[in-house]
Amino acid sequence: LDDRAVRPGELAFDKDDDECLDFVTAASNLRSAIFNIPLQSRFKVKEIAGNIIPAIATTNAIIAGYIAIEALKVLKNGGS
């Protein structure tokens, strides 16, 4: 695990690293079992993990657009 450390106390996750993927699959399936959610295969977990970063980037872009629209409304109304 030491070679995975980005900074002390932190670990980097790589969906292509088998050990990382095994850990995330096991942890997510344990949590799924607790809440009666269907368990997922390693392949499905890898697919989901691969979609997280694009989803975050898309969400950030949408929110930034809404903030810009609201800022334009405030400027148009003279700040009131």
Image: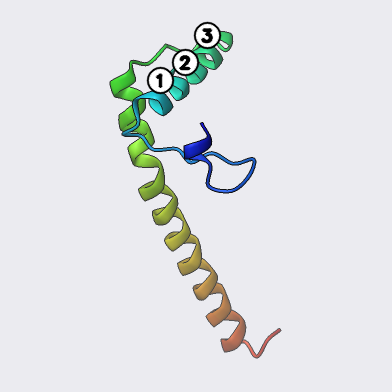
Kind of residue at disc 2: Ala
Residue at the image point whose x is 53% and y is 47% from the top = 6
Kind of residue at disc 3: Ala
Image coordinates of residue 29 in percent, x first then y, are 47, 14
Q: Alpha-carbon neighbours of circle 3 within 10 Å: few (<14), some, or many (≥20)? A: few
Nearer the camera: disc 1 or disc 3: 1
Q: Alpha-carbon neighbours of circle 1 within 10 Å: few (<14), some, or many (≥20)? A: some
Q: Earlier in the sequence, mark 1 or mark 3?
A: 1
Residue at the image point whose x is 63% and y is 44% from the top = 8
Q: Which residue is mark 3?
A: 33
Q: Which mark is residue 22?
A: 1
Q: Which residue is mark 2?
A: 26
Extreme right residue here? 80
Q: Nearer the viewer, residue 77 or 46?
A: 46
Please determine whether, in this image, residue 25 is positioned above or below residue 3: above
Image coordinates of residue 38 in percent, x first then y, are 42, 11
Query: Where the C terminus falls, by quadrant?
Result: bottom right
Q: Secondary structure at mark 2?
A: helix
Q: Alpha-carbon neighbours of circle 2 within 10 Å: few (<14), some, or many (≥20)? A: some
Q: Is residue 44 left or right of residue 53?
A: left
